[in-house]
Image (cartoon, rainbow, N blue to C red):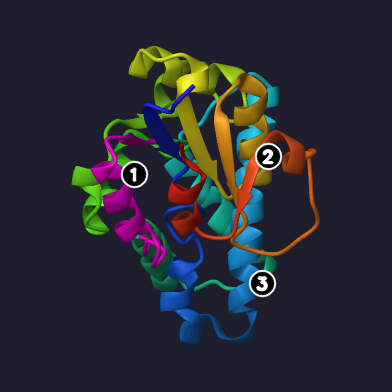
Amino acid sequence: MALSALLFDAYGTLLDIHASVARHQARLGADAAAISTLWRQKQLEYTWTLSLAGDYRPFDILTAEALDFALAQHGVTDAALRGDLLEAYRRLDPFPDVAPVLEILKARGLRLGILSNGTGAMLREAFASAGLINQLDPLLSVERLRFYKPDPRVYAMAVEQLGLPASGIGFVSSNAWDAMGAARFGFRVFWLRRQDGPLEYDLLRRTTPIASLTEIASNLP
């Protein structure tokens, strides 16, 4: 069936998760890229571990704890720098293809929204800062459920909130594990391959792989 709504993952899909470290790269020195990578790795690891353990801590807290781990791993003890990195994470840069594609998709009559691990406050601030807040409604957060993607109940929340069947909802994510979860639930998934890498989770069969958001429109009926 034709899609009535298109939901996007936020972090890594629309928002550049490495932008925070990039803004302070000179202060972090040669370890900047490694710190950014480890920060993201631990952030995701904490969401999965807590969900498996039946526990929950908000995404902003896990983000700070993951940064603390990454900085400690690389011997960075500058408290002011830590604060600046977390402040920058609240206002991440959108990727260049985001704004123009959202405009095109909106003009086609699609309802556009977010389905994210981020807290509601994080999402509102991030997309307001990016100038995209008026393009995206709803901003759906796992915060109300108190567990993280790819738990199928997260995708079920979107069905409930939008009042649409799963087959009428498209979902875009650059995270393979998230694309897998959404596809298994029944969304039509666009796997945004912002970075090259090995194939995972049989996603070539389960999803529509795209290299840029600009490819979405050409893959819609």
Vertical placement of 86 versus 161: above or below?
below
Amino acid type of the residue that numbered disc 1 sits on in the rendered structure: Met
> In the rendered structure, which amino acid carries the disc numbered 3?
Ala
| Residue that appears at 39% across and 67% down | 96
State the residue position of label 2: 177
Q: Does residue 6 show up magenta in the picture?
A: no
Please, is residue 146 above or below residue 193 in the view? above
Q: Residues within 10 Å of mark 2 (few under 14, many from 20)?
A: some
Disc 3 versus disc 2: nearer the observer = 2
Tell me whether circle 1 and circle 3 mark residues in contact (CB < 8 Å). Answer: no
**Disc 1 + disc 2, Cβ < 8 Å:** no
The crowding category of the residue bearing disc 3, from other C-alpha atoms within 10 Å (few below 14, some 14 to 19, many at least 20), is few
In-front residue for pair 201/120: 201
Q: Which residues are magenta?
A: 92-114
* Comes first in the chain, label 3 or label 2: 3
For the point 58% across and 66% down, the residue is 36
Label 1 sits on residue: 122
Instruction: Tell us which disc is closer to us: 1 or 2.
Output: 2
Q: Residue at x 22, y 51 (%)?
A: 128
According to the picture, the residue beneath numbered tag 3 turns out to be: 34
Q: For the residue labelled by badge 1, is the local secondary structure a helix, a strand or a loop?
A: helix
| Residue that lies at the very extreme toward the left in this rendered image | 134
Q: Which mark is residue 8?
A: none
Horizontal relation, residue 204 to residue 103: left or right:
right
* Residue 111 drawn at (x, y percent): 30, 32
- Indicate the amino acid at tag 2: Trp
Element carrying mark 3:
helix
Residue 169 percent across, percent down from the top left: 46, 26
Residue 112 counted in the magenta span: yes
Q: Earlier in the sequence, mark 1 or mark 3?
A: 3
**Of the residues under marks 1 and 2, which one precedes in the sequence?**
1
- For residue 11, say whether it is visible: no
